[in-house]
Image (tube, rainbow, N blue to C red):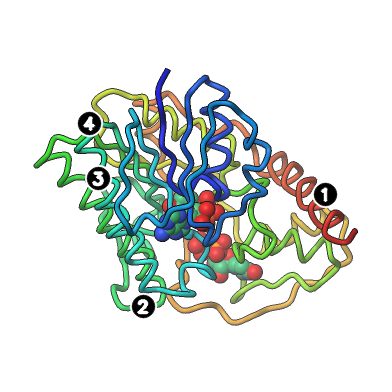
């Protein structure tokens, strides 16, 4: 069976990917520096015979023998990636060079966890893979957006120049259990606020949209993208059902039966106004589309946070 390296394996998505690949019989090596990840996300795997954990920062080279690399290491929440923007760029650029260098040397297939953020504040709607994006190269989000754009550039060039077998997954907003309580992204913020009976913080007038994908659907899509032969072009992975942020806040208050009120906070600069994936390519090439609707996914996620907050209180 395959030996698989997952960078960022202690994070939200990475830890679910560790679970799924181990269930499929793979031998998994998880590499993480725990900047935004948490040992609690993978603690249940510590006694698994085919799981290994290495604390390592991917801006430094790494030498291992594996068959596949899922390259997820990078903080994904604006709160975390803006904390040390220079480090975020280094993680995307130097980290991706290191992982591509490793993939080249050991002839491993490598998948990059890219992002819908490479489209910036899009002028095309919904966004197909052929859209080149509208990114502010000097704004507060650019350490992440431009970092990922360079990471995509590196993937394509290692493929063309060095024949590295690459995959690029452009992930749209994904949520679910194991997001950190203080992650700062909208779904976890709203659920934690609603469960604590605190004000639910809508930035701006809440008319901006996002399209939320449940984690299990996204993990299936990542594995299908990796396993697809001759598939080096970028592919959008996400749920095309679009909601405004205000609708999301109202839905979460209702599902948690919370007495929380909505409060307005200033809209962060360069916050994209609309985001929705065109997933025609994933449907056609992978036969994939999300199965979990927003209510269903939120109910699972609320149950997770309810439990986490109870444990913290004890
Ligand atoms: P996360 O912050 O929970 O996980 C990222 C993991 O990478 C963490 O465990 C962190 O400690 C680790 N990490 C960060 N910098 C590192 C470094 N220099 N060396 C080693 N490890 C490092 O975020 P996530 O939501 O799980 O996102 C995982 C990947 O998917 C990221 O690359 C992100 O850009 C991408 N992505 C996620 C979403 C989403 O909605 N969740 C959307 C688009 C793209
Ligand atoms: N947002 C919000 N309140 C919060 C956190 C986020 O209104 O407490 C908004 C944010 O301004 C953005 C949307 O929710 O318009 C999604 O934000 P998130 O940070 O989750 O993801 P991204 O902006 O990177 O898509």
N-terminal of the two: label 3 or label 4?
3
Residue at mark 2: 139
How packed mark 4 is, by other alpha carbons closer than 10 Å (few <14, some 14-19, many 20 or more), is: some
Residue at mark 1: 307
- Name the spot of residue 50 as percent of width and height, x first: 53, 27
Could you say which quadrant of the image residue 204 lies in? bottom right
Asked if residue 275 can be seen in this view, the reply is: no
Task: Give how far apart the Cα atoms at labels 3 and 4 are.
Answer: 10 Å
Image depth: mark 3 or mark 2 in front:
3
N-terminal of the two: label 1 or label 4?
4
Q: Is mark 2 within 8 Å of ligand 2?
A: no
Helix, strand or loop at label 3? It is helix
* Mark 1–mark 2 CB contact (< 8 Å): no
* Mark 1–mark 4 CB contact (< 8 Å): no
How packed mark 3 is, by other alpha carbons closer than 10 Å (few <14, some 14-19, many 20 or more), is: many
Helix, strand or loop at label 1? It is helix
Task: Give how far apart the Cα atoms at labels 1 and 3 are.
Answer: 39 Å
Quadrant of the drawing holding the N terminus: top left
Task: Give how far apart the Cα atoms at labels 1 and 2 are.
Answer: 37 Å
Between residue 158 and residue 42, name the one nearer to us. Answer: 42
- Image-quarter location of ligand 2: bottom right
Could you say which quadrant of the image residue 299 lies in? top right
**Residue for point 53% across, 21% down:** 24
């Amino acid at each position: 069976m395959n030996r698989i390296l997952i960078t960022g394996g202690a994070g939200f998505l990475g830890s679910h990917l560790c679970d799924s690949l181990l269930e499929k019989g793979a031998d998994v090596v998880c590499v993480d520096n725990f900047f935004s990840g948490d040992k609690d996300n993978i603690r249940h795997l510590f006694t698994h015979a085919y799981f290994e954990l290495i604390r390592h920062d991917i801006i430094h080279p790494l030498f291992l023998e594996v068959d596949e690399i899922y390259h997820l290491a990078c903080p994904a929440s604006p709160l975390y990636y803006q904390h040390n923007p220079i480090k975020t760029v280094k993680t995307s650029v130097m980290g991706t060079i290191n992982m591509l260098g490793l993939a080249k040397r050991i002839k491993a297939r490598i998948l990059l966890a890219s992002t819908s953020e490479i489209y910036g504040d899009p002028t095309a709607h919904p966004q197909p893979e052929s859209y080149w994006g509208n990114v502010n190269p000097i704004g507060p989000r650019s350490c992440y957006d431009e970092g990922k754009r360079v990471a995509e550039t590196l993937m394509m060039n290692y493929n063309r120049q060095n024949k590295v077998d690459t995959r690029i997954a452009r992930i749209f907003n994904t949520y679910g259990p194991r997001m950190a309580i203080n992650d700062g992204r909208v779904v976890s913020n709203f659920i934690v606020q609603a469960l604590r009976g605190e004000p639910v913080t809508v930035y701006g007038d809440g008319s901006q949209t996002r399209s939320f994908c449940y984690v299990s659907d996204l993990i299936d899509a990542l594995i299908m993208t990796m396993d697809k032969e001759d598939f080096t072009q970028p592919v959008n992975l996400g749920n095309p059902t679009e909601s405004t942020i205000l609708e999301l806040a109202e839905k979460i208050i209702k599902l948690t039966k919370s007495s929380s009120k909505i409060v307005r906070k200033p809209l962060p600069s360069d916050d994209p106004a609309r985001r929705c994936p065109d997933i025609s390519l994933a449907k056609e090439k992978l036969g994939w589309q999300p199965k979990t609707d927003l209510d269903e996914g939120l109910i699972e996620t609320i149950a997770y946070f309810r439990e986490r907050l109870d444990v913290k209180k004890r």
